[in-house]
Image: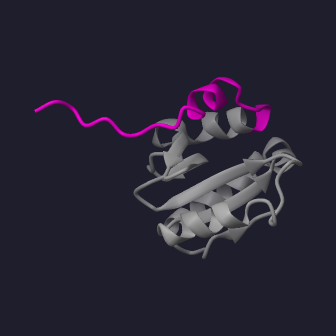
Amino acid sequence: MPPVRRTISPHAAPLRRARTEAENHFWQAARNRQIAGYKFRFQHSIGPYIADFACLEAMLIVEIDGSQHSPESDAARKAYLESEGFRILRFWNNAVLESLDGVLTVVSAALAGSAAGGDAR
């Protein structure tokens, strides 16, 4: 039987190559199951959207946002991802760059189920 290929947005590959400094910092801390043994995917396609970081086993998405994001502009995206069963944590770029340990603590708590998820800005 041939391997199953997942659908990848044509926008995901350029986003992977042009990651921000904050995304790179988080990715270095999250890759290879470094956060509580959970696997994260970088620029993962979910329906018509691309999640910055997705942990499928915990149904958790971590978004690292710059100034172009706002609750209003991301409302439809958030509604879709939550309808698919995902919890979303959002962090500003500067939060990741200035307090990566704090960000990782919030993500670890969400993975452990002790946090309900939400907007960490």
Question: Can you give x and y, in whole percent of width and height, for residue 44 in the image?
Answer: 52, 43
Question: Can you give x and y, in whole percent of width and height, for residue 5 in the image?
Answer: 31, 35
Q: Is residue 11 left or right of residue 96?
A: left
Residue 24 location, quadrant? top right
Residue nearer the viewer, 90 or 37: 90
Q: What colouring does the structure picture have?
A: one colour
* Residue shown at the point (62%, 59%) measured from the top left: 107
Q: Is residue 69 left or right of residue 88?
A: right
Residue furthest to the top in view is 17
Magenta-highlighted stretch: main secondary structure? loop
Q: How many marks?
A: 0
* Residue shown at the point (58%, 46%) measured from the top left: 50
Question: Can you give x and y, in whole percent of width and height, for residue 93 in the image?
Answer: 82, 45
Residue furthest to the left in view is 1
| Quarter of the image with the N terminus in it | top left
* Residue shown at the point (86%, 48%) measured from the top left: 68
* Residue shown at the point (89%, 48%) measured from the top left: 67
Based on the picture, tell me whether residue 19 belongs to the magenta stretch.
yes
Question: Can you give x and y, in whole percent of width and height, for residue 121 in the image?
Answer: 82, 62
Part of the protein shown in magenta: 1-22
Residue nearer the viewer, 2 or 34: 2
Based on the picture, tell me whether residue 79 belongs to the magenta stretch.
no
Residue nearer the viewer, 44 or 114: 44
